[in-house]
């Protein structure tokens, strides 16, 4: 584990560099990420390249033994390029062309832009690909940030038509799969197909929601593929000259609710994953369970340790700021990342900027360049990690529970969300949160992944699966796995069309139930009772008729009082639960305990409000992180004697954790 800083050598006088690097050394900051927005310095005019400034920065960083993640600068195409080649600009859903002035104003499919990136990226990779100060690469910056994955320009339209032709072969086939017979949408050729923009009725159905769902879903897939392809090309350019590992900084699900990029697919192009973690800032305050969920997603995309490439270091925002991190929180957030599988945490940013849009984005040190309390806190973390590294290698939580994350399902639900308050990410978080509160780590998996390492797999609202994915889930259960299937699962084909089978469609056999009726809840609550105690549903109620399944919960109000809401079915050597409704937080927690313990997972662990507990291992050594997200101290009872690894003290019976405090319980000596 180690720490780093996001740094902009180009924002400061060269005479200041030394002071900064010495301060970094003193704080045990071992790595900086640089160069992601520097195109106009590298290539101030078309074909005129300058690298001296970067040469000097790297040389100086090397003297201080600070390692570098170097970026490809494609997030900010310069003004001369935009003026000369306006066709590189993104177009939005209403046909508005995104102009120069901020960032991410380019189209991933623009052949001109791809060529310009290709030229510069290869030059950068060639020059620095073996540089001793460099240790890794970042592609672009926050791909898909601010709704930029989906572009609606002419070049995208041409590419989309090719993509469709490749997928469907004949236009008749596409017409059939999309059901274009509805509303006179039958196409005569692929050339007639437009990217689905805001439809004629967009004031009734916001943006594109009046469009054909099959067409929309394919367009979302195409857009994600375009970003992945752009990344693949960039990686190819880098790998032609460099063996250093490549990443790109992904966005959280908590604040950004998805970029429209299939991160599993994107991760296949990368050597390691990383993401940007802002917890309390202008755009909101993230719940600790949601941050933990985001970390879990990041370790899951490659099932490997990841980096936090940007982590909040001070009060921040653009026009206005969120709160200053209370003393202890920078450290708490850092260890929470480590506990969840991060091996490097890089703080954004080293020093608060004196100019530009992000003047209010406070760094480790302030505008005045003097080390203050945030610097001291981070230096303390650096010191602790130096000691901890003598004991620990790369830590990962050992997850016995997995939640299926399907980008097809996410996008399908975003096109038609079934009922006003349904949001796939939030719905998945409801399951995640329950296990999080019990200190049970959860991974995210694709429906096609090997599942044998998990005792319990949850498939929330898995609306569509391909045959091989269904077979994978079925054989996991037949071999003894436990699977929870929930509302809105298995009812559509991959073209976003409804299946003619009774609900739950392709899962009916495994679940041993049928659902002849359902009640989408707009503004009422339905009461429920079962192995999860007494509770309420306020989103959706499937009225379940067991075929071979046993009833574990029933509705106790409304016209379906007495009908089943939760069942379990024996299937092969395993079990399939079908949960027909959403559950309030307490009921969900009880369901987690019930299903977890039946899958053989000890669920009677700590349950201290606001305490994050993660058990990890580096393969040899054990670490149990206790992270207090409360503003008050907590006393955590202990069953065994441990060594607290940061202080080196033996703890027994109980341990007190200060507000925002951290403890790492180990078994060995220190
Ligand atoms: C991230 C971005 C950084 C910086 C930071 C603060 O989204 O990658 O470049 O802008 O937020 O806004
Ligand atoms: Zn485009």
Image (tube, rainbow, N blue to C red):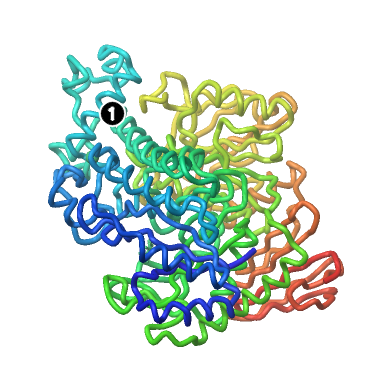
Residue nearer the viewer, 282 or 423: 282
Q: Is residue 92 visible?
A: no
Residue shown at 62% from the left, 74% from the top: 382
Quadrant for the C terminus in the image: bottom right
Q: Is residue 154 above or below residue 64?
A: above
Task: Return the x and y of residue 407 as percentages of the image width and height.
Answer: 44, 38
Task: Return the x and y of residue 241 as percentages of the image width and height.
Answer: 47, 44
Residue shown at 51% from the left, 47% from the top: 428
Quadrant of residue 439 in the image? bottom right
Residue shown at 48% from the left, 56% from the top: 275
Q: Is residue 76 left or right of residue 92?
A: right
Q: Is residue 337 above or below residue 247?
A: below
Task: Return the x and y of residue 229 as percentages of the image width and height.
Answer: 38, 36
Q: Which residue is mark 1?
A: 215
Q: Is residue 495 above or below residue 89?
A: above
Where ligand 1 lies, by quadrant? Answer: bottom left
Residue nearer the viewer, 31 or 544: 31
Q: Is residue 199 left or right of residue 639?
A: left
Quadrant for the N terminus in the image: bottom right
Task: Return the x and y of residue 626 as percentages of the image width and height.
Answer: 69, 68
Residue nearer the viewer, 95 or 32: 32
Q: Is residue 190 visible?
A: yes
**Dot 1: what SS?**
helix
Q: Is residue 666 left or right of residue 551?
A: right
Q: How many marks?
A: 1
Query: Does the Cβ of the disc 1 residue fall within 8 Å of ligand 2?
Result: no
């Amino acid at each position: 584990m180690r720490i780093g800083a996001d740094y902009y050598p180009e924002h400061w006088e060269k005479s200041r560099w030394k002071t900064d690097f010495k301060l970094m050394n003193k704080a045990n900051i071992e790595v900086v990420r640089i160069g992601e927005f520097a195109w106009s310095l590298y290539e101030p005019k078309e074909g005129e390249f300058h690298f001296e400034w970067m040469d000097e920065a790297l040389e100086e960083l090397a003297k201080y033994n600070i390692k570098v993640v170097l970026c490809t600068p494609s997030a900010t195409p310069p003004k001369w390029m935009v003026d000369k080649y306006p066709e590189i600009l993104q177009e939005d859903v209403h046909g508005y062309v995104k102009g120069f002035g901020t960032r991410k104003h380019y189209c991933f499919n623009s052949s001109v832009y791809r060529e310009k990136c290709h030229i510069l990226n290869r030059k950068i990779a060639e020059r620095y690909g073996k540089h001793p100060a460099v240790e890794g690469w970042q592609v672009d910056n926050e791909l898909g940030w601010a709704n930029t994955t989906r572009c609606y320009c002419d070049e995208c339209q041409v590419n989309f038509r090719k993509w469709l032709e490749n997928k469907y072969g004949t236009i008749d086939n596409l017409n059939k799969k999309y059901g274009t017979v509805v509303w006179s949408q039958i196409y005569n050729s692929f050339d007639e197909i437009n990217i689905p923009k805001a439809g004629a009725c967009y004031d009734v159905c916001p943006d594109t929601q009046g469009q054909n769902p099959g067409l929309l879903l394919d367009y979302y897939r195409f857009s994600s593929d375009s970003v992945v392809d752009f990344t693949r090309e960039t990686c190819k350019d880098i790998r032609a000259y460099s063996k250093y590992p490549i990443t790109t900084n992904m966005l959280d699900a908590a604040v950004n609710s998805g970029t429209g990029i299939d991160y599993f697919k994107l991760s296949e192009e990368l050597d390691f994953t990383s993401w940007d973690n802002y917890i309390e800032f202008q755009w909101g305050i993230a719940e600790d369970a949601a941050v933990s969920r985001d970390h879990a997603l990041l370790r899951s995309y490659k099932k490997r340790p990841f980096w936090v490439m940007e982590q909040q270091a001070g009060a921040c925002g653009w026009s206005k700021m969120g709160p200053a991190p209370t003393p202890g929180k920078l450290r708490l957030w850092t260890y929470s990342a480590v506990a969840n599988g991060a091996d490097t945490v890089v703080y954004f940013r080293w020093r608060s900027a004196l100019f530009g849009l992000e003047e209010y984005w406070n760094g480790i040190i302030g505008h005045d360049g003097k080390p203050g309390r945030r610097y001291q806190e981070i230096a303390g973390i650096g010191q602790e990690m130096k000691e901890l590294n003598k004991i620990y290698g790369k830590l990962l939580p050992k997850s016995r529970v997995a939640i299926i994350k399907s980008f097809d399902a996410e996008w399908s639900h975003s096109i038609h969300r079934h009922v006003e308050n349904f949001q796939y990410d939030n719905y998945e978080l409801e399951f995640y949160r329950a296990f999080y509160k019990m200190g049970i780590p959860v991974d995210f998996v694709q429906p096609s992944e090997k599942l044998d390492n998990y005792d319990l797999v949850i498939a929330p609202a898995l609306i569509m699966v391909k045959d091989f994915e269904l077979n994978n889930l079925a054989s996991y259960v037949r071999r003894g796995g436990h699977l929870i299937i929930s509302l809105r699962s298995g009812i559509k084909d991959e073209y976003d069309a409804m299946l003619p089978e009774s609900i739950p469609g392709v899962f009916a056999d495994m679940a041993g139930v049928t659902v002849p009726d359902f009640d989408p809840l707009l503004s009422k609550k339905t009461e429920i009772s079962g192995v999860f105690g007494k509770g309420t549903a306020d989103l959706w109620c499937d009225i379940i008729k067991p075929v071979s399944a046993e009833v574990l919960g029933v509705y106790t109000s409304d016209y379906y009082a007495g009908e089943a809401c939760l069942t379990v079915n024996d299937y092969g050597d395993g079990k399939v639960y079908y949960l027909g409704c959403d559950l309030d937080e307490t009921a969900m927690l009880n369901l987690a305990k019930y299903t977890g313990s039946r899958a053989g997972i000890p669920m009677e662990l700590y349950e201290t409000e606001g305490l994050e507990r993660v058990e990890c291992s580096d393969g040899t050594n054990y670490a149990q992180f206790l992270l207090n997200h409360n503003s008050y101290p907590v006393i955590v009872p202990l069953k065994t004697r441990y060594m607290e690894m940061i202080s080196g003290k033996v703890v027994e019976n109980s341990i007190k954790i200060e507000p925002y405090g951290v403890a790492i319980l180990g078994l060995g000596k220190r």
